[in-house]
Image (cartoon, rainbow, N blue to C red):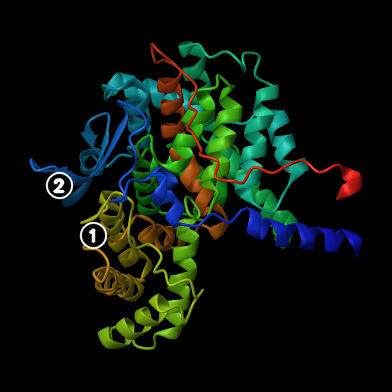
């Protein structure tokens, strides 16, 4: 009882001591969340890796919203995706090569690189044992622990030379699918009593197909499933240096720490519901809407219910329509546009067009509802972000919700590693150290006997 009371007492005390009034951020011109007043990110670094474009700068200094663009090493992801689709091949391996090297590989380079990734995919015996023995109830947590465990078996774990960083990066990128698949299968076995399946990756499969094979076995997926998952991995591979998990990797890398510690920190950041876990929130909301809205084609019924969500009357009562809005994209999120294209093809294959049409109408009405609410305060445009469709796509492929966020990590590990390499190769490196202003009161010390 004393322990519970002490925890309660500390909690009540912290409620007051940790409270900082919002207006103080304005008073001291503090960029809360490293955001400017117009919600754009505070410029804190330079990169040649990725570029996230949602605005165009006009001559008068103002910002004009534009259809979103995402560039990998200066190349539009729409071109990466559409060319891979046109040639009827997977494109994630090509994307990895582009991000790591800075240029597109030729046929021979891509073939050799894809073979290297396939040969590096299998886990060492000790890593498999670690996953089996430690178990756990969250795949992201198991992934982070396994990455830290890999430090132990790397004879050059602390070597930050370029050659070694590339070696470690390729190894991590290749092994993430197996770690996630094995972690989920072990979780499914221990928590749900399902049969335990540990499938060795096939060196003739792409990364996307290998993941589906290790998760579901032969015959458990279609060719379209592979292509759509490959697309999802391409569009999640990189998103500039300012997204929370990549920035976390850059911050930790700036200290000179080892690759495994830095990547584990990135995993911890991505696990948060405001970052990589966002599509789970969207999924819960969509399931709720599908149940509560009786007529999926009735605009008036949909509009009325979305207003109830914004008024904090229903669902989680936080007044948010998840999957709508983004920190940078305004007119459109290019990732959502690409995923939506393939979602339609997948819905036709799975016989789920009715759900797709409902989701499409929800997107339109949700944007309308949020814009009407926002226009009372600001004229900022909003669009559906990639999370609005990703959960629906993963569900159609037949993947469990426990791997939705790990799938994000399986893709973003490419961006993390690339940004880490760049951070450690600046000519004039320095540790990232922002400043915080202390606004607490100065207090005299009181001896213990007088308190």
Whole-percent x and y of residue 365?
Answer: 27, 75
Q: Secondary structure at mark 2?
A: loop
Along the line of sight, the residue nearer the viewer: 118 or 50: 50
- Whether 198 is drawn above or below 247: the answer is below
Q: Residue at x 44, y 65 (%)?
A: 282
In screen coordinates, is 290 left or right of 326?
A: right
Tell me the residue that label 1 is attached to. Answer: 380
Residue 300 visible: yes
Instruction: Using the rendered view, name the quadrant where residue 252 is placed.
Output: top right
Label whose residue precedes the other's in the sequence (2 or 1): 2
Tell me the residue that label 2 is attached to. Answer: 62
Q: Residue at x 15, y 44 (%)?
A: 56
Along the line of sight, the residue nearer the viewer: 348 or 170: 170
- Whether 375 is drawn above or below 64: the answer is below
Along the line of sight, the residue nearer the viewer: 299 or 306: 306
Gap in angstroms between the C-alphas marked 2 and 1: 13 Å
Which numbered disc, 2 or 1, marks the residue closer to the eye? 2
């Amino acid at each position: 009882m004393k322990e519970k009371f002490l925890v309660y007492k500390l909690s009540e005390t912290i409620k007051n001591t940790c409270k900082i009034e919002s207006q103080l951020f304005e008073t001291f011109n503090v960029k809360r969340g490293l955001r400017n007043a117009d919600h754009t990110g505070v410029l804190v670094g330079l990169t040649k890796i990725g570029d996230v474009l949602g605005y165009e700068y006009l001559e008068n200094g103002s910002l004009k919203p534009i259809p979103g663009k995402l560039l990998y090493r200066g190349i539009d992801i729409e071109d990466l995706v559409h060319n891979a689709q046109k040639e009827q091949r997977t494109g994630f391996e090509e994307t990895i090569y582009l991000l790591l090297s800075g240029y597109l590989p030729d046929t021979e380079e891509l073939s050799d690189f894809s073979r290297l990734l396939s040969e590096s995919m299998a886990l060492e015996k000790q890593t498999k044992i670690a996953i089996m023995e430690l178990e756990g109830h969250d795949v992201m947590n198991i992934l982070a622990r396994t990455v830290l465990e890999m430090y132990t078996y790397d004879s050059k774990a602390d070597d930050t030379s370029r050659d070694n960083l590339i070696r470690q990066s390729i190894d991590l990128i290749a092994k993430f699918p197996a770690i996630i698949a094995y972690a989920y299968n072990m979780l499914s076995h221990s928590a749900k009593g399902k049969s335990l399946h540990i499938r060795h990756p096939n060196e003739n499969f792409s990364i996307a197909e290998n993941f589906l094979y290790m998760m579901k076995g032969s015959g458990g997926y279609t060719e379209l499933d592979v292509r759509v998952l490959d697309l999802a991995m391409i569009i999640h591979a990189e998103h500039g240096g300012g997204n929370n998990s990549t920035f976390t990797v850059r911050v930790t890398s700036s200290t000179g720490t080892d690759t495994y510690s830095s990547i584990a920190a990135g995993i911890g950041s991505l696990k948060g519901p405001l970052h990589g876990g966002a599509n789970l929130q969207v999924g819960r909301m969509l399931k709720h809407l599908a149940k509560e809205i009786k007529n999926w084609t009735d605009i008036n019924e949909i509009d009325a219910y979305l207003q109830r969500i914004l008024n904090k009357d229903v669902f989680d009562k936080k007044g948010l329509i998840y999957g709508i809005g983004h920190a940078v994209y305004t007119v459109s999120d290019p990732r959502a546009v690409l995923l939506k294209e393939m979602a339609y093809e997948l819905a036709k294959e799975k016989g789920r067009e009715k759900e797709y049409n409902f989701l499409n109408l929800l997107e339109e009405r949700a944007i309308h509802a949020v814009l009407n609410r926002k226009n009372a305060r600001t004229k900022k445009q909003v669009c559906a972000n990639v999370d609005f469709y990703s959960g629906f796509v993963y569900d159609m492929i037949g993947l469990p919700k426990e791997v939705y966020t790990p799938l994000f990590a399986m893709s973003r590990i490419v961006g993390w590693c690339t940004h880490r390499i760049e951070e450690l190769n600046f000519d004039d490196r320095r540790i990232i150290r922002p400043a915080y202003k202390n606004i607490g009161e100065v207090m005299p010390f009181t001896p213990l006997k007088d308190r």
